[in-house]
Each structure stands twice: as structure tokens, then as C-alpha cells.
Image (tube, grey):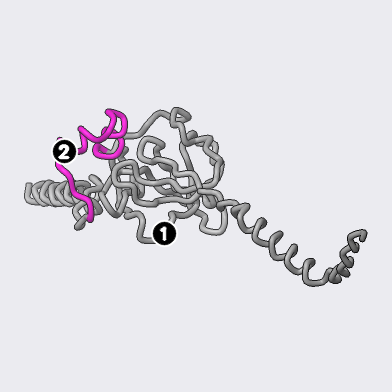
Amino acid sequence: MKLRALHLSLAGLVASALVFALVKTGTGQEAQAKNRKVVKSDAEWRKQLTPEQYQVTRQAGTEPAFSGKLVNEHRKGVFECICCGSELFSSRTKFESGTGWPSFFAPYDKTAVDTSTDFKLGYPRTEVTCSTCGAHLGHVFDDGPTPTGLRFCMNSAALKFARETPAAAKPKVVKAEKAEKVEKVEEKKAPAKAETPAAESPK
């Protein structure tokens, strides 16, 4: 009886430790508990975002594969947080993963995103959130391409694309100024015309 009671006690301790670990690291809240530069109430986020954007970013949801509008976005630019506008990823690090979600091998900046352990599916995954407002973006996996070997698998609903602004064309006024200078130089080089004496009037 004593041995059985000891086994039950040990089992209870193991179960308690497991539940504690799941609560502590499985909810993904440790990253969101940090001090954020952008903080809004739930009502404010609901008002600002579409139902899909709110469900993904504020409730850690996942959009269906191949449903996002940024999966096939190949233009040059920056992918920003849909909630706060922070720059999160660059088109230079985007690649085709074939998963159905926008994928990047590195964030725009090391401080742009936060990560935490997520056990929502029963096994550990690394959740990625915006470091500025805590928005859920997706997850990162270690099956990406070089040079990082990482695959940041993001939700289109959590991002907005900002197209890279092309360099402005040089104004035509500059060309006009150059042409005027050339004309002045040519005038200086040209020989002076001899003056023709005036004809004498008949007597």
C-alpha cells in the first residue's frame, strides 16, 4: 500500500509539473507580457482590424494555406505589421516554400520580432510575434534555406505590403541649364563679325 501511494504521489507531481510547463510556455504569452511600444484595448483592436486580421493577430489564429494575398507577392518592398505598421520582413528574404504561407529566411531586423514556445497543437513550436505591439504573426521552423536555415512562416492577414519607392527621375530643368551653358560657350568661341561700312548717300 505504501509503495502504491508513493507511485501515485510521484505521478501527481509529474502531472503537476507538466501542466505548469504547458501553462508557462505553451500559451505563447511570455512574449506578449513584455512592455510594448503600442498598446491598445481589445475593443480598439476589434475596431481597427477586420475579423480575420483580429482572429490571426490578437487570438493567435492561422489563415488557410494558399488563401493569403501575400503568398505570391514578388515585388520589391517591405512587409509591415498590419496592427502597428512596424517593418517586419523584406522582399529580399522572401522565398517560395510551397507551404501556402508567405515565407522568409530572416526578419527585417533582429529586434523586429519576438519568439516564444507554443504547445497549442500538443508539441513545441516557436511562435513569432511583433516586438512592437505583440501581434501574432506565425511560427518559425528550422527547415529554411541558406544563409540562416530558418523559415519564418507568416500569415498574410498579419502583414501589409509597402512597395519600394523608385528613385525619382532627374528634372529636365537640369538639362536646360546645361544647354544654356553650352550655348554661351559657343558664343564666346565664335569669331566676331566684321562691321560693314555704311553706304554713302548719293550727292
Which quadrant holds residue 67?
top left
Sooner in the amino-acid sequence: mark 2 or mark 1: 2
Q: Which residues are magenta?
A: 37-59
Whole-percent x, y for residue 16 in the image: 14, 48
Q: Outermost residue toward the front?
A: 203
114 with respect to 169 (left or right): left
Q: Is residue 200 above or below residue 128?
A: below
Residue at horizontal 26 percent and vertical 49 percent from the top: 134
Image side of residue 90 versus residue 157, left or right: right
- Total number of numbered discs in the rendering: 2
Q: Is residue 87 magenta?
A: no
Mark 2 touching mark 1, by CB under 8 A?
no
Residue at the location (8% across, 48% down)? Answer: 5
> Which residue type carries mark 1?
Asp
Label 1 sits on a secondary structure element that is loop
In the image, residue 34 sits, relative to residue 42, either above or below, namely below
Does residue 8 sit above or below 149 in this rendering?
A: above
Magenta highlight on residue 38 = yes
Residue 133, position as x, y percentages in the image: 25, 49
Residue 39: image x %, image y %?
19, 49
Residue shown at the point (52%, 55%) measured from the top left: 149
Q: CA distance from mark 2 to mark 1?
A: 27 Å
Mark number displayed over residue 109: 1
The three-letter code of the residue at mark 2 reads Asp
Assess disc 1: are there few (<14), some (14-19) or many (≥20) residues with their C-alpha within 10 Å of its C-alpha. few
Q: What numbered label is drawn on residue 42?
A: 2
Graded by Cα atoms within 10 Å as few (under 14), some (14 to 19) or many (20 or more), the crowding at tag 2 reads few
Q: Which of 89 and 105 lies nearest the eye of the viewer?
A: 89
